[in-house]
Amino acid sequence: MCFISSSTLKIDLSNTGGKMKRNIDAQNLAEILRKKSVDLKNKVCLMANLKGTKQEKDLSLPVNCRGFGRIHHFQLTPDPSWISDPLPMLPTSKYLGIPQEEIIQAQVFQLAACNFRCWYCFVDFDLLSANLKHSSFITANELFGYILEEKVESRVIDLSGGQPDIVPEYPLWFLQARQEMGLEKEYLWQILF
């Protein structure tokens, strides 16, 4: 269970059988992670590299884009036990001028920093702590280059976290790179958490 009170995130682990509770100063951690995760002068972010991580073992498809990316499938009609969510399906179809499809593949890139530790998050904490063992500083142009190099067939780019608000420049740099490289037909979508 997550409780957010002012700038402190309290994680109650008692519902998982543990009795440990800890507090995280989310604001302070965000400031520390921002310093470790972005180089504004060179427009680079610290991006998670999934190759060889616990998260890679949990994926249904192999990592791509030299380990920095993965494919996620969004379904318009989800499993009956799950909630219906038309994002990014409907805006993607409209933006790209394509027929609405039942399944859309999204190329996902993960920022390697997050100041929260939510109980439901599937991302290993090593990939959220600006850990250079599992991440590298990389430009948006380089990531788009990897998409083109590997001929990734996704027209949706999902900028994920981590916590993208730690580096709010991240989506803007992707939009600029997309324009510089003549890739305006790509769609950009950001998950905040």
Image (cartoon, rainbow, N blue to C red):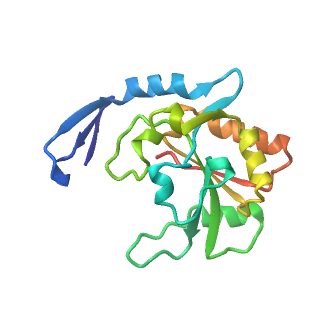
Foreground of the two, 141 or 183: 141
Q: Is residue 187 left or right of residue 149?
A: left
Give me the residue at 61% from left, 66% from top. 89
Left or right: 138 as drawn, with respect to 119: right
Q: Position of residue 148 (x, y in %)?
A: 79, 53
Q: Please indicate whether residue 174 sits to the left or right of residue 182 in the image.
A: left
**Nearest the camera: 86 or 107?**
107
Q: How many marks?
A: 0
Above or below for 38 versus 121? above
Displayed quadrant of residue 64: bottom right
In the displayed image of the protein, which residue is found farthest to the bottom? 80
Q: Which residue is drawn at the image coordinates 38% and 38% (left, top)?
A: 116
Give the residue drawn at x 61%, y 34%: 136
The correct choice, above or below, for 172 with respect to 108 in the image is above
What residue sits 62% from the left and 49% below the top? 67
Q: Quadrant of residue 47?
A: top right
Vertical placement of 179 versus 132: above or below? below
Q: Nearer the viewer, residue 21 or 68?
A: 68
Q: Nearer the viewer, residue 80 or 127?
A: 127
Q: Position of residue 183 (x, y in %)?
A: 82, 50
Q: Position of residue 175 (x, y in %)?
A: 73, 42
Name of the residue lying farthest toward the left: 19
Query: Percent position (x, y) of residue 163?
Result: 49, 39
Residue sitting at the far front:
52
Among the 4 quarters of the image, the one containing residue 142:
top right
Left or right, 147 with respect to 171, comes to right
